[in-house]
Image (spheres, rainbow, N blue to C red):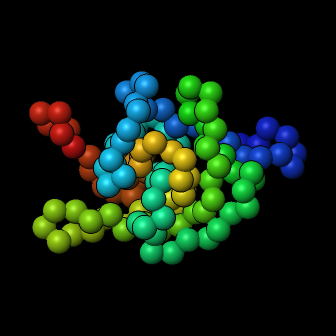
Amino acid sequence: MARTKKNGPRYLICVISKSLLAYCDEEAWWIDSASSRHVTKSINYFVDIKELKTGDHKVYMGNNIYCDVLGIGTVKIPLPGEMNLLLTDVLFAPNMRCNLIFVSRLDDKGYEVKFRSGKV
């Protein structure tokens, strides 16, 4: 995260390849190669969360929209076959349209992301 002023708010950058997305299923997670952090709009995924003060942290999207980040923590995402994916340092931004998984973070943790026939 970078600060614009010494004690100013922190900003993160997220990019989604689909533009003008009006609705995104709250259960869906988008794989994003351009964002800088995992982000979810649903507090229900968190197994632990540290609340953040409104206005101190924001997510910036490419369409000049900012969303407040209200928390950071670990989420558990259910996967097929009764498995779960645990992601750490996930931002809670309830005004985001979609939940984002940052591909580079997965790679850093040793995960492999494969794309085939339009699916991950």
In this rendered view, identify the residue nearer to me: 87 or 95: 95
Rendering coords of residue 58 (x, y %): 66, 46
In this rendered view, identify the residue nearer to me: 67 or 89: 67
**From the viewer's perspective, is 107 left or right of 52?**
left
Instruction: Write the residue at 36% across / 52% down.
Output: 26
Q: In this picture, is 100 found above or below 13?
A: below
Instruction: Write the residue at 55% across / 27% down.
Output: 62
Rendering coords of residue 27 (x, y %): 32, 55
Q: Residue furthest bottom?
A: 48
Q: Is residue 50 visible?
A: yes
Q: Residue 33: which quarter of the image?
A: top left
Q: Residue 17: which quarter of the image?
A: top left
**From the viewer's perspective, is 113 left or right of 12?**
left
**From the viewer's perspective, is 25 left or right of 59?**
left
**From the viewer's perspective, is 107 left or right of 66?**
left
Quarter occupied by the C terminus: top left
Instruction: Write the residue at 55% across / 71% down.
Output: 49
Instruction: Write the residue at 21% across / 69% down.
Output: 83
Q: In this picture, is 5 found above or below 29?
A: above
Q: Looking at the image, how many numbered discs can be counted on the residues?
A: 0
Rendering coords of residue 71 (x, y %): 60, 62
Q: Residue furthest front?
A: 22
Q: In this picture, is 88 found above or below 37?
A: below
Rendering coords of residue 25 (x, y %): 33, 47
Q: Is residue 1 visible?
A: no
